[in-house]
Image (cartoon, helix red, strand yellow):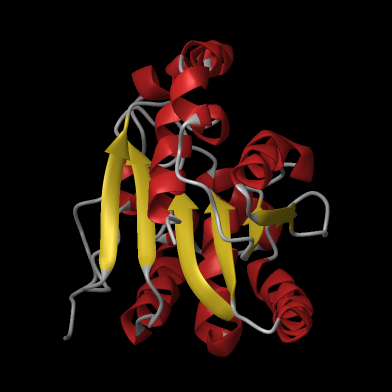
Amino acid sequence: MVIDQPDYCRRPSLFSTLREIGTPLEVTRLARYSNQLMKAPRGDKRPIVLLPGFQSPEIALQPLSAYLNYLGYSASTWGFGVNTGKVDELTLKFGEKLARQADEAGEPITLIGWSLGGVIARETARLFENSVREVITMGTPLIGGPKYTSVGSVFARQNGIDLDEFEKEVHRRNSIGLTQPLTCIYSKSDGIVGWTAAIDVYNPQARNVEVDSTHFGLGVNPKVWTIVAETLVP
């Protein structure tokens, strides 16, 4: 199936970007929904690796990692510290590490990527296919790379790229397709990544799920945690 390069994506609105200030409120939701979260289906000890977003430290994903371990999975963060945004370099380094981890575990590994971490997770799934069981992304700029994000110009300057040309390369890679199960969580209130760019239109097996959350709140949003838990049901 050939898909034309999407031309309908837009950056987040100024209102959505300003709404990111309310991210701390997402944490309070966890307390309100704690009983429901504790009743989620138990896991099967399968290995899961979580990847942080652009310029985000691994600690940002520790709450979700801890929750998945509570459910009975073997979850950990990727082990490379802050995500510097060098996608190709990090994909190769992470992919090689993941391949060894998958060999040791005797099974492919589930990847959960937040924002740019989801891009690296998907690229890893493409290049190290046998090492990846499935991919879950949260607010990941799947279309256009950084072009439809509120930090796109900053990313472009830091990496010396032309956003329009980079968008074409992202489309080319996306058009190759992935074989693993894919779940893409997005929010129309996302103030960092334009929500239309966080939806997978390339892979027929992709499941796109909407939540109400700020971008920075996705990692601690109880609805996101519920979706992740339900997706991972053995």
In the foreground, 202 or 70: 70
| Figure check: 176 above or below 68 | below
In the foreground, 158 or 58: 58
In the foreground, 29 or 229: 229
> Residue 164: x percent and y percent?
40, 64
- Identity of the residue drawn at 54% across and 14% down: 21
- Identity of the residue drawn at 75% across and 59% down: 78
| Badge count | 0
- Residue 94 visible somewhere in the drawing: yes
Q: Quadrant of the C terminus?
A: bottom left
- Residue 42 falls left or right of residue 224: right
Q: Quadrant of the N terminus?
A: bottom left
| Figure check: 158 above or below 189 | below
> Residue 53: x percent and y percent?
62, 47
> Residue 28: x percent and y percent?
55, 11
> Residue 130: x percent and y percent?
56, 88
In the foreground, 137 or 155: 137
- Identity of the residue drawn at 36% across and 34% down: 12
- Identity of the residue drawn at 67% across and 61% down: 159
- Residue 139 visible somewhere in the drawing: no
| Figure check: 222 above or below 160 | above
- Residue 131 falls left or right of residue 152: right
